[in-house]
Image: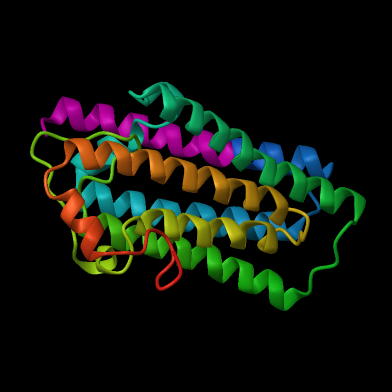
Amino acid sequence: MRDGRMNSLATRTILGFAQLILALALVIFVAAGTLDFWQAWLYLAVFAISSGLITIYLWLHDPHLLERRVRAGPVAEQQRSQRIIQLCAAVTFLAIFVVSGLDHRYGWSSVPLAVVILGACLVTLGFYIVLVVFKENTFTSATIEVAADQTVVSTGPYALVRHPMYSGALVMLVGTPLTLGSWWGLLPVLVMGVVIVWRLLDEERLLARTLRGYTDYRQQVRFRLVPFVW
């Protein structure tokens, strides 16, 4: 990339990262009605450090993928169905933090310290799985699209499931309400799981039509999201 393009990417990445962390903090603490919420501070630290390290890795080793990841959200999607799915995903994602924050405010849950720590480990593991996927497949755009030079990747985590990035995202999402000390926050996670399945099934239909070799790959790797399950 040229210097001007790299500078633009750096600006968009830093601003996007800061806006995301601030937005998450705002949603959590407003819903909780207090800053005295140590589980939230733990979660934000784990989330910021994990996502920050991945961003640094992409900046150093795959800036083209980082640029594709910066373009995200319902507006960035080319397919109408995916714009709807992404909107549902964004609302459900925020609901996880709203419900968990309200749970803290009203004391609906009593989550042991060990479970909170387990949740933080799951969040970290989820991000690590996503990093492994990024290292294996440079075409993991934040939007559903097929690049002109894209090829099917069947190695690494793709030898186990066809959508390992979604698998990592699910692990991270399950860990989120646990880290925030909320059992009730798992309810929107279940809804998010349905949205992810909806998204990947729609994505597979597109890939089968437009990505050469993907139909054969689907026959070779039978599981979509969870190894030996589905």
Relative image position of residue 180 (x, y in whole percent): 71, 58
Q: Is residue 65 magenta?
A: no
The structure residue drawn at horizontal position 18% and vertical position 36%, both measured from the top left corner, is 210
| Res 174 quadrant in image | bottom right
Q: Nearer the viewer, residue 29 or 106?
A: 106
The structure residue drawn at horizontal position 49% and vertical position 46%, both measured from the top left corner, is 196
Q: Which residues are magenta?
A: 1-22
Relative image position of residue 129 (x, y in whole percent): 38, 64
Q: How is the image coloured?
A: rainbow
Q: Is residue 18 magenta?
A: yes
Relative image position of residue 15 (x, y in whole percent): 43, 31
Q: Nearer the viewer, residue 98 or 152?
A: 152
Taking the image as shown, residue 39 lies to the left or right of residue 148, namely right
Q: How many callouts does the rendering have?
A: 0
The structure residue drawn at horizontal position 50% and vertical position 26%, both measured from the top left corner, is 84
- Report the residue that reaches farthest toward the left: 149
Magenta span: helix, strand or loop, mainly? helix
Q: Quadrant of the N terminus?
A: top left
Measured along the vertical axis of the image, is residue 10 above or below residue 51? above
Q: Quadrant of the C terminus?
A: bottom left
Taking the image as shown, residue 213 lies to the left or right of residue 226, namely left
Measured along the vertical axis of the image, is residue 114 above or below residue 13? below
| Res 82 quadrant in image | top left
The structure residue drawn at horizontal position 63% and vertical position 52%, both measured from the top left corner, is 189
Relative image position of residue 90 (x, y in whole percent): 56, 35
Taking the image as shown, residue 212 lies to the left or right of residue 171, namely left
